[in-house]
Structure formats: C-alpha cells, structure tokens
Image: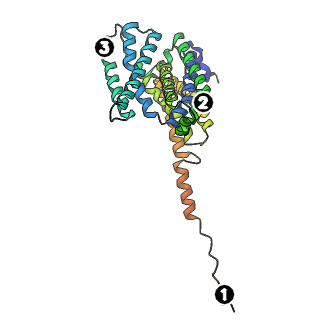
Amino acid sequence: MTNLLEPFEYEFMRKALLGCLLVGFTNGYLSGFIVLRRHALLADGLSHSLLPGLAIGAIFFSLNPFGLFLGALVAALLVVIGGKMIAHSSRLKDDTAIGALYIAAFALGVILLKFAPVRVDLGHFLFGNVLGMANTDLWITYSLSFFIVLVLTIFQRHLLLTLFDPVVAATIGVGVAWLDYLLIGMMVMAMIASLQAVGVVMSIGLLILPAATIYLLSDSYDMMVWGGAFLGMTSAVAGLFLSYWVNLPSGPAIVMVLSLCFVGAYLFGPRYGVINRILNNRRARETPAPPKEPVVDLPPTMS
C-alpha cells in the first residue's frame, strides 16, 4: 500500500491525478455522443486543426494558457465552418471538405511554430505531458469539463433524439443542425481541456475508445455515456500509474490502457466478442439435431 501511494508524495503527481480524473471522465462522457453520432473521423480532423491556433497563440501571447485556448478554439471553429461552407457550395461531402482543410491547417501550424518568439516543442502540443500541469491548466481543465458535462446533460434528451432519429427530431421542431454544431463545439472544448494532459493527437483516444469499448459490451445508452465516463477516468489514472512506474510518456500510456480495454472487449465480450461468437458457433455445430419423428402412413378415409 505504501508503494502504491508513493507517487502522490510529490505535488506534480497529485496535480496529474486530478487532471487525469477530470479529463478522463469528461472525454469518456462525451465519447458516447461522438460514437453514436459517428463523428469519430470528424474528431480526428478537429484535433489536428487546433495546431495553427496554438501556434498563433504562442506567437502573440507566448505560452499563456488563455491565449493558447483562444487560438485553438478559433482555429477549430474556422475549419468546421469553412468545411461546411465548401461542402454546401461544391460537390464535396462534409467529411471530405473538413479533411482537406484540417490537413492544410495542421501543416500551417507546424510552419507557424517556427515563428514563435519562445521555443516550443511540437511534441508537447501533440502528445501532452500531464506531469507538467500547473494550477492554471487545472483551472482551465476543471472549468471546461464542468461546462461540457453540464451542457450535454441539459440537452441530453434533444441530442438523443437527433442521434437516433434526426428526421423525427426535425419534424417536431428540434434544431438538428444547431445541436450538431453544439456537439462539435463540445468536442473542441474537450480537446482543449485535454491539451496539457494528452495533447491534440492522443486526445482522440479519450474521445473515441471509451464509448467504442462499452458499445462492444452493452446495448444500453446510459451505459455508453456513464460507463464510458468511468472507463475513461479509470484508464487515465491507470495510465498515469503506468507512466510513473515504467517511465513512459503519460499521454501514450493512457491511450494504450484504453486500447487494451478495447481489444479485450472485442475479443472476449460476452455478447459481441469474437471468441465468444466462435465458441457459440462451434457448440451449435456440435450439438446433435433432435431425432425426427417417424412418419406414419394413415389408411385412406372410408367415405
């Protein structure tokens, strides 16, 4: 027990633990909406589109967290709005238009970082460092996490209707397009909240893997949302311990723990697991068919 609590003798580990709890729970909670809305690829594009905003924030505000937050938010929203505009005015679909813009935005961000007045490590933005969370980072993470969970809980019923039957939702007057933009905005804020902990690239794992894992284990919507939140939180803490004891980067360690949970659910899930399906099919083939009852020829009916 003493060895287990040893890491928390250090202040940076206590801050890292709080950051993992906040980021893991919030991203896991949001991941249910992302998986059901099939926004996984969009989330990947948005994560890369944060980089030019971070670079511009570093150029004008140095490494001030609020300047980086503002730059990342504006950059992601510009990519989303620009992608929608291109899709509506051309033959391209939304995912293609946003994909074209986000890769251009990512390249622009790498170039702009060269002009930052302070030395900026690109790997810090891409993969994060939860062990380096300062008090300001924790306050930003806490504020954004609280806001995201509050908004999603308030609009949960409307979001649920648009996720499963957008046609009916539009018919009864629910703003489907507005709620879609709201969900995208929450995704951007969650990525920004995760920036210091796991970076813009590794944040995709926290936004997709928790709900994807639960989806392989359960058909319950509540389980996807709250179970995803619990899985994201516990996996983030487990990844933090792993990174401390094995001396691994914290962001990749957290995502690897989630990945192992996903692979375990895929292989050994009680209902949809591959191995369980193979065993059930084998049992079905080996079970002998019930014997057929003999057919008795009845004598012709006398008229």
Q: In front of the other: label 1 or label 2?
A: 2
Looking at the figure, which quarter contains the C terminus?
A: bottom right
The kind of residue on which mark 2 rests is: Gln
Residue under circle 3? 114
Separation of residues labelled 1 and 2 (CA atoms):
66 Å
In-front residue for pair 25/32: 32
Which circle marks residue 298 in the picture? 1
Residue 143 occupies which quadrant of the picture?
top right
**Numbered disc 1: secondary structure:** loop
Which circle marks residue 244 in the picture? none
Separation of residues labelled 3 and 2 (CA atoms):
42 Å
Separation of residues labelled 3 and 1 (CA atoms):
95 Å
Q: Which badge, 3 or 1, comes first in the chain's sequence?
A: 3
Q: Which badge, 1 or 2, comes first in the chain's sequence?
A: 2
In the depicted structure, whether residue 245 falls above or below residue 168: above
Residue under circle 2? 156
The figure's colour scheme reads rainbow
Count of marks placed on residues: 3
Give residue 221's position: percent from left, percent from top.
60, 38
In-front residue for pair 31/275: 31
**Numbered disc 3: secondary structure:** helix
Q: Report the residue at 54% width, 23% height from top.
A: 23
- Using the rendered image of the protein, determine whether residue 261 is visible from the camera's viewpoint: no
User: Is 43 on the left or on the right of 297, as rendered?
Assistant: left
Q: In front of the other: label 3 or label 1?
A: 1
Q: Which badge, 3 or 2, comes first in the chain's sequence?
A: 3
Residue 300 occupies which quadrant of the picture?
bottom right
